[in-house]
Image (cartoon, helix red, strand yellow):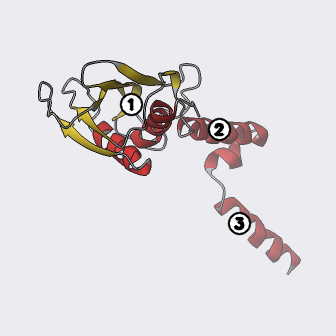
Amino acid sequence: MRRFLFTLLAAVAGATQTACAIFTPVPAIELLKATATATSTAIAFGPSKASHTVRHEHAPVQSLCIELNRQAPVPDVLPALQAELRTLQIDSRIYDTGVSPESCAVWLRYATAMEWGIPPFQAEHRPYLTAASLTLQTADGQILSSSQYELDAVFGMGKWATTRSKISPVVVALMTGFEN
């Protein structure tokens, strides 16, 4: 009976392991590989931050117009911008380049860059935001504030985070002048 229980326990333990864990000479190496994979995945989806923020004193912005940048390759930047502005209770409208309604006293202009890559645990390429530059200007072109997002070049911190989570700290910095 004892031998039967031991055999059953060994069979269950073996069935729950991958072939690598069963046949590896050093299970610690497998544990180290799993830890490294988990760490790199956490870094890839980690938080983003604003940088190079400059803000000149001005009245609080209640509404603004966003100039559509047809050269910006990231398709979900505008929804992310508008969602973050709504979070800050700022109304926004999008206008094509060259269209400037008289009701637009403040303009938000932006530029973005993207790259393609394969996210962790997926098989297909996907675009991701690598840089964004936001500038808040008056209708006559005076710069009120500017802020940027740049993907961490060393560890790729936040590489696979959503565009909105990358843009969020930049929008907050643009409106408040405070980075993170």
Residue type at mark 3: give it: Ala
Q: Earlier in the sequence, mark 3 or mark 2?
A: 3
Residue plotted at (44% across, 47% down): 88
Labels in figure, total? 3
Label 1 secondary element: strand
Residue type at mark 2: give it: Thr
Q: Earlier in the sequence, mark 2 or mark 1?
A: 2
Mark 2 lies on residue: 39
Q: Nearer the viewer, residue 31 or 99?
A: 99
Residue plotted at (22% across, 27% down): 69
- Is residue 48 at least partly visible in the picture? yes
Q: Could you say which quadrant of the image residue 35 lies in?
A: top right
Label 3 secondary element: helix
Label 3 vs label 2: CA separation? Answer: 31 Å
Label 2 vs label 1: CA separation? Answer: 21 Å
- Neighbours of disc 1 within 10 Å: few (<14), some (14-19), many (20+): many
Residue plotted at (21% across, 23% down): 71
Label 2 secondary element: helix
Q: Nearer the viewer, residue 27 or 38?
A: 38
Residue plotted at (47% across, 42% down): 165
- Neighbours of disc 2 within 10 Å: few (<14), some (14-19), many (20+): few
Q: Position of residue 4 (x, y in %)?
A: 80, 76
Q: Could you say which quadrant of the image residue 98 lies in?
A: top left
Q: Which mark is residue 59?
A: none
Q: Which mark is residue 11?
A: 3
Q: Residue furthest left?
A: 99
- Neighbours of disc 3 within 10 Å: few (<14), some (14-19), many (20+): few
Mark 1 lies on residue: 129
Mark nearer the viewer, 2 or 1: 1
Asked if the residue under mark 1 is in contact with the one under mark 3, i.e. CB atoms within 8 Å, the reply is: no
Q: Residue furthest right?
A: 2
State which quarter of the image contains the N terminus.
bottom right
